[in-house]
């Protein structure tokens, strides 16, 4: 978790009550503390009932879905294509970059 926060930042805020009771995001909060973060994004919910808080915690943890082997392989394949584009894609990206630089100079 700590490495994910370091590399990508906080993707989902932690959840607390208006009384500052942590409902969800314990691992995210601990990882942020270990990284020395002094602030973290939060979502405040007005849940005064312990039962509601526990339901929210369970809901958050059960809604996470592990990727299947096929889904994970497809994601890594897509990532590889983005990191290592083919010749036509590199040419296209060079053309796009060229025009961005030209129009950026003209606007300045």
Image: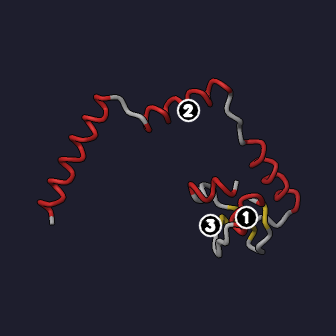
Mark nearer the viewer, 3 or 2? 2
- Residue 39 in the image: state x and y as whole percent: 63, 73
Q: Residue furthest top?
A: 70
- Neighbor class of circle 1 (other Cα within 10 Å; few <14, some 14-19, many 20+) is many
Mark nearer the viewer, 1 or 2? 2
The residue at which mark 1 appears reads as: 29
Secondary structure under the numbered disc 1 in the rendered image: helix
**Would you place residue 61 above or below residue 67 in this image?**
below
Q: Are marks 1 and 2 in contact (CB under 8 Å)?
A: no
**53 lies left or right of 7:** right
The residue at which mark 3 appears reads as: 41
Residue at image point 63% right, 53% down: 4
Secondary structure under the numbered disc 3 in the rendered image: loop
Looking at marks 1 and 3 on the same chain, the residue that comes earlier in the sequence is marked by 1
**Would you place residue 79 above or below residue 46 in this image?**
above
Q: Tell me the CA gap for discs 1 and 3.
A: 10 Å
- Neighbor class of circle 3 (other Cα within 10 Å; few <14, some 14-19, many 20+) is few
- Quarter of the picture holding the C terminus: bottom left
Q: Tell me the CA gap for discs 3 and 2.
A: 29 Å
Residue at image point 80% right, 69% down: 21
Residue at image point 69% right, 61% down: 14
The residue at which mark 2 appears reads as: 76
Quadrant of the rendered image containing residue 92: top left
Looking at marks 3 and 2 on the same chain, the residue that comes earlier in the sequence is marked by 3
**Would you place residue 57 above or below residue 79 in this image?**
below
- Quarter of the picture holding the N terminus: bottom right
Secondary structure under the numbered disc 2 in the rendered image: helix
Q: Are marks 3 and 2 in contact (CB under 8 Å)?
A: no
């Amino acid at each position: 978790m700590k490495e994910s926060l370091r590399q990508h930042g906080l993707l989902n805020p932690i959840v607390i009550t208006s009384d500052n009771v942590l409902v969800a995001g314990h691992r995210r909060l601990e990882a942020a503390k270990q990284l020395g973060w002094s602030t973290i994004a939060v979502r405040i919910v007005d849940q005064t009932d312990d039962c509601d808080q526990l339901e929210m915690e369970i809901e958050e943890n059960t809604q996470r879905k592990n990727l299947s082997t096929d889904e994970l392989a497809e994601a890594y394949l897509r990532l590889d294509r983005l990191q290592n584009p083919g010749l036509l894609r590199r040419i296209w990206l060079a053309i796009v970059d060229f025009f961005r630089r030209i129009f950026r100079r003209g606007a300045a």
